[in-house]
Each structure stands twice: as structure tokens, then as C-alpha cells.
């Protein structure tokens, strides 16, 4: 008996009791649908984290000032002006694994153009920030080193600022007032989106660091060369841990810290933080898929149960087939094909329900989902495996029946 004939016999046997067949397939349908939906949600979360890593910039280290302690009260990171522009220059000069560094100072004020205004973050930095953060412009250009050294009155706008201040107009060449200082817009940055902690990275304007020191943020700064942060980009292929340690050793030497003294700065390895988030989302995906797979196991047990019932009901049929020449392996193949057909039919319906459910989750819950073909193939293959695994015992039991006893079975 070939497989095609077995498949036709199997479909005919399943049509004899359609309700029972449908209820048997229900576990497989739910299991396959749940696996696809859960894996799609998990894959969407991983894709979101990957986007955040790309938006933040790969191989990044952030250096922040240390904290001030007053009468036993520690005021937190950033309260002690312990890092400077000279530290930034020394890092890129003396640490071989560093590709670029960019010191920055920060503040917040209104950006005014005509009758519109917008409160945003103001960041003074150097042209190297473009390379350190991998943040090109969508129109215009970055300010150059001459403009940075000369404290030129120029500004770059983030996408959020450009949209809220200028609407659909092209801001390049326009003059805006930032903290009351007229600045010429030389470029608009490409969209970065939200950071991993939910901050809108596009709600910012960039100005040369000496423009910030002398014209915009000067009165609020504790010293001329102190900075609020140093952004460091490590060369591709270099060890982030080693680069972090070399930076720490260099800064401790420059700040003349003794072995027993704590660091007066704080180093954050942003890539490690985001990679940890990615690993967490991957574990979550596997956990969700494992939970959903329980339904497949339950469905497989249902298939085994119904196939055992089928063997009992069709004992005389089995005896008759053996009496006219069917071998044990033919009977085993017939019942095994029935179990696999039942499982695969449920798998196909489950795939359809899983895809519909995934897009429903994306629409109603507004979650990011990613329906991967690999997840569909995995769920379909797993449903076939369930059919084979749980259908083998009933098929083997049917093939071992004694023909004479089977024909006499009532």
C-alpha cells in the first residue's frame, strides 16, 4: 500500500466522524497558533531592541562626571565637574582602540523662530560627535572644526524640533533664537527615534561646544573646559571591556587618583546594556514558545487517545485487511498516516489562526510583531513530528493484532 492510497483512506476515515476529528485537532490548532503568535511577539521585541542598538550607535562608551559628597550626603553622578575636553582629547590620542570621542555640555531652553517656539535639550559638542554617534544629517551639513573653535553661531536641529518649530518648511539657512542667541540652522539630523529608556533622541539641538560655553550655557557651567559627558566610539572588532579598562586607567592617572580612592567619574558601556536587553528578549521568546508548545503536547496526547479508540472500533476491518493479504507494516503505515494527516491538518489551520492572531495583537495592542517564515516552518514541522510520535504506538498496536481474533472481535 503506497502513501497516496494511505492518505486517501486516512481522509475518508477522518470524514466518518468530523466532529471527533475536529475536537482532536483542536489541541494542535491551539498549539501551533500559540507558538506562531508568541514567537512573532518575541521576534518583534528583539527587532525593536536591535533598532535601539543601531539608533544609539554601536560600540559606545559614555563617560559621566562623578558625584559630590557634602557632610555625608552624596548628590549623585554628574554633580562633580571632574571630566574635561582635555580628557576627551587624551582618550582618543592615547587609547589605540578608540575611533572617536566627543565631549558635550547640556542645557535646556526655548528654540524660537517667528511666532513658534519649542522647549528642547541643547547640546554643545564637537564635529566628532557625528562619527561617535553615527548620526548624519538628512539635509544641510554638520558644523566643521573651524566653526567649533571659533564659537560660530550655528545650530543643527533634531527631527522633533524641526517638525514642531518649522512644520513642513525647510529650516536650513533660517535663523532661530536659542536661549536668546540668534543661530543659523546649518542642518537637520536624521531621525534616531526613542532610546532604550524611552527618551526621544530627536528632541535636541546641537551647537559648537565653545558656542555653548561662551554664548548659550556659559553662566551655568562650573568651569570653562568641564563637560557633562564624553561619548566614546570603540573601533569595530576591539574589546569593549579592554577599552573600558584602558579608559579608566588613563582617567585615574590624569586625575591623580591614588589606589585607595574611588573613581571621580562614571563609565557606562551602552552596548553591553542593550545586548543584555536583547538577550533578555531572546530568553522571553524561547519561554513563550516553550509555554505554547505545551498545547502541542496536549494535542498529541489527544491524537494518541483518538487513534487508540479508532483501532478498537476498526478491529474487524484490520482483521479483514490482514485476511486478504495486508501485512503488519501496511496496517502500521495506514494508521500512522491517519495520525500524521490529522496532525498536519490541525497544523495548517493553526498556522492560519496564528498569523491572524499575530496581526490582531499588533493592531489592537499596538505591539511590534515579526512573523518569521522560520517560525511557521518550525511549528508545521513540530506538528508533523507530534503526529508521528503520538501516532506510532496506536499504529504499532494495530499492526500486531492477530487476524483470526480480529475477525472474531465484536
Image (cartoon, rainbow, N blue to C red):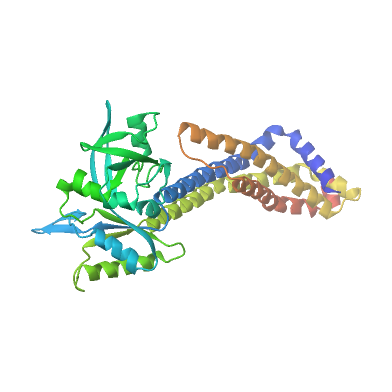
Q: Nearer the viewer, residue 129 or 262?
A: 129
- Asked whether, in this view, residue 410 is left or right of residue 72, the answer is right
Q: Residue furthest top?
A: 115
Q: Position of residue 259 (x, y in %)?
A: 21, 74
Q: Is residue 291 depicted above or below 97 in this figure? A: above
Q: Nearer the viewer, residue 150 or 375?
A: 150
Mark yes or no: residue 26 visible.
Answer: no
Q: Residue furthest right?
A: 324
Q: Is residue 253 depicted above or below 371 in this figure? A: below
- Asked whether, in this view, residue 41 is left or right of residue 97, the answer is right
Q: Position of residue 40 (x, y in %)?
A: 53, 43
The C terminus lies in which quarter of the figure?
top right
- Asked whether, in this view, residue 237 is left or right of residue 325, the answer is left
Residue found at x 37% / y 32%: 163
Q: Quadrant of residue 27?
A: top right
Q: Position of residue 306 (x, y in %)?
A: 68, 43
Q: Position of residue 159 (x, y in %)?
A: 38, 37
- Asked whether, in this view, residue 259 is left or right of residue 37, the answer is left
Residue found at x 39% / y 44%: 141
Amino acid at each position: 500500500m503506497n502513501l497516496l492510497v494511505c492518505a486517501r483512506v486516512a481522509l475518508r476515515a477522518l470524514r466518518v466522524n468530523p466532529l471527533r476529528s475536529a475536537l482532536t485537532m483542536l489541541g494542535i490548532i491551539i498549539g501551533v497558533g500559540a507558538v506562531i503568535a508568541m514567537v512573532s511577539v518575541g521576534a518583534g521585541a528583539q527587532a525593536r531592541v536591535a533598532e535601539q542598538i543601531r539608533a544609539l550607535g554601536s560600540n559606545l562608551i559614555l563617560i559621566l562626571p562623578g558625584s559630590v559628597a557634602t557632610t555625608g550626603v552624596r548628590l549623585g553622578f554628574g554633580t562633580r565637574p571632574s571630566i574635561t575636553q582635555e580628557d576627551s582629547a587624551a582618550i582618543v590620542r592615547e587609547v589605540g582602540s578608540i575611533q572617536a570621542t566627543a565631549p558635550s555640555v547640556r542645557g535646556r531652553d526655548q528654540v524660537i523662530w517667528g511666532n513658534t517656539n519649542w522647549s528642547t535639550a541643547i547640546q554643545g559638542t564637537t564635529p566628532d560627535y557625528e562619527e561617535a554617534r553615527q548620526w548624519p544629517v538628512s539635509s544641510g551639513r554638520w558644523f566643521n572644526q573651524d566653526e567649533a573653535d571659533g564659537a560660530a553661531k550655528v545650530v543643527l536641529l533634531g527631527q522633533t524640533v524641526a517638525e514642531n518649530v518649522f512644520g513642513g518648511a525647510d529650516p536650513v539657512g533660517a535663523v532661530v533664537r536659542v536661549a536668546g542667541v540668534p543661530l543659523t540652522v546649518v542642518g537637520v539630523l536624521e531621525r534616531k527615534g526613542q532610546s532604550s529608556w524611552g527618551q526621544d533622541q530627536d528632541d535636541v539641538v546641537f551647537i559648537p561646544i565653545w558656542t555653548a560655553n561662551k554664548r548659550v550655557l556659559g553662566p551655568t557651567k562650573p568651569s570653562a573646559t568641564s563637560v557633562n559627558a564624553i561619548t566614546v566610539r570603540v573601533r569595530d572588532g576591539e574589546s569593549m571591556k579592554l577599552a573600558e579598562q584602558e579608559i579608566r586607567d588613563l582617567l585615574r592617572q590624569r586625575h591623580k587618583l591614588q589606589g585607595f580612592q574611588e573613581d571621580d567619574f562614571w563609565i557606562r558601556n551602552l552596548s553591553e546594556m542593550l545586548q543584555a536587553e536583547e538577550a533578555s528578549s531572546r530568553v522571553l521568546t524561547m519561554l513563550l514558545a516553550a509555554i505554547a508548545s505545551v498545547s502541542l503536547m496536549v494535542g498529541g496526547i489527544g491524537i494518541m487517545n483518538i487513534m487508540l479508540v479508532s483501532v478498537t472500533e476498526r478491529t474487524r476491518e484490520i482483521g479483514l485487511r490482514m485476511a486478504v493479504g495486508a501485512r503488519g507494516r501496511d496496517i502500521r503505515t495506514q494508521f500512522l498516516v491517519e495520525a500524521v494527516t490529522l496532525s498536519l491538518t490541525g497544523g495548517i489551520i493553526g498556522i492560519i489562526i496564528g498569523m491572524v492572531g499575530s496581526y490582531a495583537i499588533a493592531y489592537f495592542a499596538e505591539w511590534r510583531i515579526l512573523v518569521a517564515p522560520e517560525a511557521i516552518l518550525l511549528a508545521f514541522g513540530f506538528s508533523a513530528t507530534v503526529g508521528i510520535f503520538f501516532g506510532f504506538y496506536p499504529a504499532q498496536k494495530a499492526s500486531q493484532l492477530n487476524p483470526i481474533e480480529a475477525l472474531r472481535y465484536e
